[in-house]
Amino acid sequence: MGWEITHIAQTESTNRWLKDRGGAARTVVWADYQTAGRGCGTNSWESERGKNLTFSLMLHPEPLTASEQFRISMVVSLAICEALDQLVGDISIKWPNDIYWRNGKLCGILIENTLKGVSIKDSIVGVGLNVNQERFVSDAPNPVSLWQITGQPTDRGELLGDILRRIDMLMPQAYDNGQQPGAAEGLRRKYMSRLYRRRGFHPYVDARGAFMAQIADVGDDGLLTLVDDSATPRHYAFKEVQFVI
């Protein structure tokens, strides 16, 4: 596949491992255990040693500008969904990039970009995917694993390979170049069709309180637009609104 893949027993975090080594493009590291694995912000990630798929990959997507960085998130989340489709049904993307099975969180994605001028020089994509963990003991509200869904183990290495192949297939659509005019809009439509709670009104909470709304759009910049039950549009950046599950 042209990916340089390293498998290690333990590290603080796979994102940090790549940062410290200044990984070349298409470098992947996956670890059996992370001592400080985390999600976005201050969120931590519970993962039993040797049970799950925790990995990071390095991209150098310099054709993409800072305003187009959400395309990386769409590519990776869609690639993971398509790989999981081969194992289970009912897979969706909870905005912006959590992977859900029904109402359970199966996977989290953390993307850290470095800019060079207006372009994205480096993109480190960290993924935590619950694979063979049989139970969760933290206070995380709704984790679920493939083992809990299927009742059988999944080969983590094979799943990683499938995800990387699908990233390769989807990534050219992010560049929307002369060879693929309109490809990025097609990518966004695929992403929209995968959204968790894409249809109907559901409960949310923002700084003003609880309300009912339906998803109207996700912009090129990743901003979420909800329309509440009074037909008023509400626009949100990441962490500005919570899904009530």
Image (cartoon, rainbow, N blue to C red):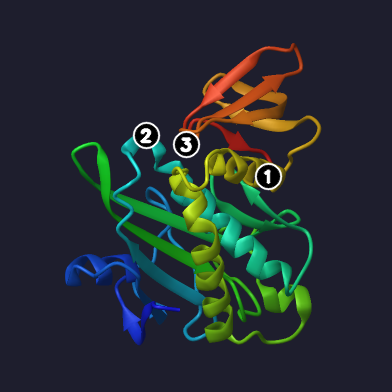
Q: Amino acid at mark 1?
A: Leu
Q: Amino acid at mark 3?
A: Phe
Query: Looking at the image, is 224 positioned above or below residue 22?
Result: above
Q: Name the residue at 39% across, 77% down.
A: 3
Residue on which disc 3 sits: 238
Considering only order in the chain, which callout, 3 or 2, is on the residue closer to the N terminus? 2
Task: Give the Cα separation between the discs numbered 3 and 1.
Answer: 15 Å
- In the depicted view, which residue is nearer to us: 53 or 217? 217
- In the depicted view, which residue is nearer to us: 166 or 203? 166
Q: Nearer the viewer, mark 3 or mark 1?
A: 1
Give the number of the disc on residue 195: 1
Residue on which disc 2 sits: 67
Percent x, y of residue 146: 68, 74
Percent x, y of residue 1: 45, 79
Question: Badge 2 local density, few (<14 within 10 Å), some, or many (20+)?
Answer: few
Considering only order in the chain, which callout, 1 or 2, is on the residue closer to the N terminus? 2
Query: Looking at the image, is 154 positioned above or below residue 222?
Result: below
Tell me: 233 left or right of 219: right
Q: Amino acid at mark 2?
A: Ser
Task: Give the Cα separation between the discs numbered 2 and 1.
Answer: 21 Å
Asked whether residue 141 is in view, the answer is: no
